[in-house]
Image: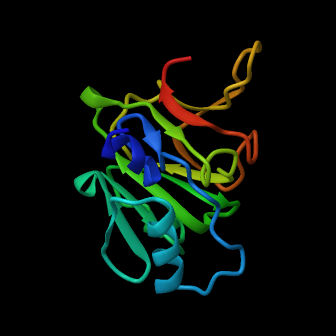
Amino acid sequence: MKTRQKAAVALSAGTLIAGGFAALPAQAASGSSQADAYMAAVPHGKKLSSNEISYENGQVRVLMSATRASCRAGWYCVWEHSNFRGAMAQWSTTKAHCKKFKFTDYWKNKVSSFRARGGCELGNYFLKDAKAHQPDPFEPFEGGKAYVRYNDRYDYASKGL
């Protein structure tokens, strides 16, 4: 599997933290030890600080602890808890290169809040929950929401319905 697919949020041009990712210990110590545990589970990242890991040459980042203000302009951000709390995954994209990101293990079924500050066309980027033999429940991925419609169910973000 390519590094970019393993990084997915990590995210990738097709994946949010990819590969076989074991969930981080719920009671892991904060700061550097959480980042180290995350990097052990999701290799090929670059530790930028005790709180931040970079993947995909900086196009994908994970903050072990973040707030709403942590989501920078030009990025799409998802949090593991409502009200923009807990770990945050973010990826950058442009209108011309609006990418599909699949969430895996740690992030799959954990997205509880989001903030969209990226460059995809408004009204054409969605959080989706893949359900076999059913239409995928979705939510427009624009603006920001402290509580998502289908809490802890989203599997990926992509263009169009």
Residue occupying image coordinates x 52% and y 62% = 88
All told, the count of numbered labels is 0
Which part of the image, by quadrant, shows the C terminus? top right
Tell me if residue 40 comes above or below residue 50 in the rendering: above
**Res 12 quadrant in image:** top left
Residue 142, position as x, y percentages in the image = 51, 39
Q: Is residue 23 left or right of residue 133?
A: left
Which part of the image, by quadrant, shows the N terminus? top left
Tell me if residue 78 comes above or below residue 119 in the rendering: below
Q: Nearer the viewer, residue 26 or 62?
A: 26
**Res 23 quadrant in image:** bottom right
Residue 20, position as x, y percentages in the image = 55, 49
Q: Is residue 8 left or right of residue 108?
A: left
**Res 146 quadrant in image:** bottom right
Residue 107, position as x, y percentages in the image = 60, 51
Tell me if residue 81 comes above or below residue 114 in the rendering: below
Residue occupying image coordinates x 77% and y 14% = 134
Q: Is residue 132 left or right of residue 91?
A: right
Q: Nearer the viewer, residue 87 or 41?
A: 41
Residue 157, position as x, y percentages in the image = 52, 34
